[in-house]
Image (cartoon, rainbow, N blue to C red):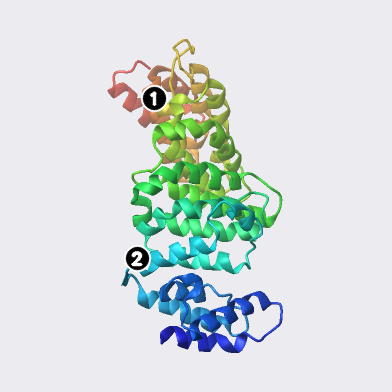
Amino acid sequence: RALAAVGAVLAPACGLTDATGMHNRFGARLVAQLVGGEPIGGADAQATAASLAAAAGDAGMGGAAQAEGTKLVEELGDAPTERGSVAGVAVAAAAAAAGGGGAGGALYARWTVATHEWHVLQAVLQHADGEFAAQQLLAVFPALAALLEPSRDPALRLTALSVVRRLLADGAFCAHADFADWAPHVLSALLVPNLVWRAGRAAQQVRLAAALCVQALVLLDPCPISPSELSEASPIILPVLRSALDDDGAETRLAMCTVLARTLPAIAASLAEEEVRGLYPDLLKRLDDANDDVRVAVCPALIALVKHATYDQNLRKPGANLDETNLSYLVRGVLVHLDDFSPDIQHASMAVVRAAMVVNPAKVCAEVSSVRDRHRSPKLCDALLAEARSASVEI
């Protein structure tokens, strides 16, 4: 009865032949199935409700049907059916409607932001419980991968990234073992390619959406991507993350600082010396960022690099990727900001120098002593040198 009522709301829009005709035809098909008592796609009433929830809001009176369908899905919630929860049935139905077989790739290539199957898939993933959504990744991932191809329309990619971000905010989804299997592919195949710089305002918004998804993924506790998987993927993802550090958008730069602070403990030791030598100047540049939040956020990334890189004074040790010369350059770049007007940046910079002092106390103390008299106040330099003395370091 509830579904019939929703169909009655949608019915007046079905005869329209304007630019929203595709959605009106979709509505007509739904109404016919409702009147005939045949649920859409052979699924049950809940899947039909999810389809109504996905109807385009601008399709005549379709907006009212969309609202009613969404309300109905929410009311049905996780009511049990013979095949699981309502949300679970909806996800399964949408995956089938999306053409999750061998021909799916060709079908997804024709999808646009207005394709009703894509509206269905968005709606059901939004309303599915996280555990079931994770179990459907085998069916859903090909659609997301096709929609997030960098050559696709930016507006379409933004809607797909919105779906990914909603899923990453679902604790049950992220905690499921199936998601752990897919997480490395989500990072390298779905998200990182959308961080690559392209001209235009729309492309900038896509990069921000992708950056926020990457940040949400790596901040999961525990992170579903193991250190060995991150290390294996670093030759592909690190150049893109470094490039995104210099993005036009401050939010994207901020997210990249957070991502690197989280991933460098896992990958720094395995980086080549050339990669470390190229990375730390990119990080130091963010200490001169126009946004103070970015300046503070890059310091944990610098700390992670200093702590987890393999240090050897002359790079003679097998696997060493950070030597005394480059450590000195890094420390000098940070010490400038120890005299910043912002106390937050002063203390964040001090934490970086303190971490470097553990790696090579004598050299770092010498660098601190050399700039002490050039600072407006020697207070923080003196504090660092006092810490070194307490640790029995010769200055």
Q: Amino acid at mark 2?
A: Arg
Q: Nearer the viewer, residue 365 or 34?
A: 34
Indicate which disc residue 306 carries. none
Give the number of the disc on residue 83.
2
Mark 1, residue position: 357
Residue 378 visible to an observer of this rendering:
no
Q: Quadrant of residue 169?
A: bottom left
In the image, residue 92 above or below residue 286: below
Residue type at tag 1: Met
- Work out which quarter of the rendered image holds the C terminus and state it: top left
Q: Earlier in the sequence, mark 1 or mark 2?
A: 2
Q: Give the residue drawn at x 61%, y 42%.
A: 246
Q: Position of residue 367 (x, y in %)?
A: 47, 22
The number of numbered badges drawn on the structure is 2
Q: Residue furthest top?
A: 316
Foreground label between 1 and 2: 2
Tag 1 secondary structure: helix
Residue 114, visible in the rendered structure: yes
Is 110 displayed left or right of 278 in the figure? right
Pinpoint residue 232: horizontal percent, then vertical percent. 48, 31
* Mark 1 to mark 2 CA distance (whole Å): 60 Å
Instruction: Name the residue rendered at 38%, 43% in the picture.
Output: 224
Q: Indicate whether 219 appears above or below 136.
A: above
Q: Is residue 282 left or right of residue 301?
A: right
x and y percent of residue 234 in the render?
51, 33
Observer-nearest of 395 and 264 = 264
The location of residue 292, given as percent across then percent down, is: 52, 48
